[in-house]
Image: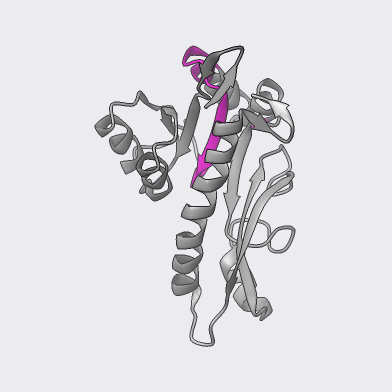
């Protein structure tokens, strides 16, 4: 929320989900201005939105194969976001890599989280890669999403020490605990200031 010319303005946030919705739960518990939940497959995330009386849309993927049209899917997603007057998008465990049209429509307004300290260990297997490489510290990164996956400007990071007895599951759970807090704090700062990277939202 921000004040402009005496008026109170609220950033309208859309959350993109694919799974259990634990990040979304944290956002709702923190009273972030979630105005829309969108899922790319049937999942608990849309149930959470519905339970919170937030519009929840299943924009299901037509395919998980090589024939999937990312640009068309992204164009359709843009139409959904515009219909709900969305200002900011938070990807929360969203399993679809989006095509160029959404980044053109909402430049710098799509936020993502990654379970590593970018630029180290980009990609789908960041936790496993950190363990395999033998680093002693990893963590989570909140960043602006861009067409190049896991490459956008970094907004926040926090380190997580890797324990000698960690496996992929235990390490990922500890990263997720940090991620939920840091992501919520970052989104709250953006919503309260009405600014992202110095640009008004």
Q: Residue at x 74, y 48 (%)?
A: 151
Residue 176 visible here: yes
Of all residues, the one furthest to the bottom in this rendering is 164
Residue 194 picture location, percent across and down: 61, 28
Quadrant for the C terminus, please. top right
Report if residue 86 lies within the magenta region: yes
> How many labels, in total?
0
Q: Is residue 55 left or right of residue 185?
A: left
Residue 51 picture location, percent across and down: 25, 33
Residue 68 visible here: no
Residue 158 picture location, percent across and down: 61, 62
Camera-side residue: 117 or 128? 117
Q: Residue at x 51, y 64 (%)?
A: 175
Residue 136 picture location, percent across and down: 65, 80
Of all residues, the one furthest to the left in this rendering is 51
Identify the image quadrant of residue 177.
Answer: bottom left
From this view, report whether residue 78 is shown above or below residue 191.
Answer: above
Report if residue 65 lies within the magenta region: no
Q: Residue at x 44, y 66 (%)?
A: 173
From this view, report whether residue 55 is shown above or below residue 186.
Answer: above
Q: What segment carries the magenta color?
A: 79-99
From this view, report whether residue 124 is shown above or below residue 2.
Answer: below
């Amino acid at each position: 929320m921000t004040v402009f010319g005496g008026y109170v303005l609220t950033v309208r946030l859309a959350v993109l989900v694919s799974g259990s919705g634990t990040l979304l739960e944290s956002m709702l518990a923190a009273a972030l201005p979630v105005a829309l939940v969108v899922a790319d497959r049937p999942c608990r995330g849309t149930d959470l939105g519905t339970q919170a009386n937030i519009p929840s849309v299943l924009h299901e993927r037509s395919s998980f194969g090589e024939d999937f049209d990312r640009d068309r899917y992204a164009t359709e997603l843009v139409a959904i976001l515009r219909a709900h007057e969305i200002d900011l998008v938070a990807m929360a465990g969203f399993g679809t890599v989006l095509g160029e049209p959404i980044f053109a429509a909402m430049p710098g307004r799509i936020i993502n989280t990654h379970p590593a300290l970018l630029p180290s260990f980009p990609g789908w297997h960041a936790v496993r890669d950190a363990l395999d490489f033998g680093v002693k510290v990893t963590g989570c990164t909140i960043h602006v999403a861009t067409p190049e996956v896991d490459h956008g400007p970094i907004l926040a990071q926090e380190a997580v020490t890797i324990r000698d007895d960690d496996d992929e599951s235990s390490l990922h759970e500890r990263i997720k605990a940090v991620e939920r807090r840091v992501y919520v704090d970052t989104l709250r700062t953006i919503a309260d200031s009405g600014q992202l990277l110095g640009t008004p939202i």
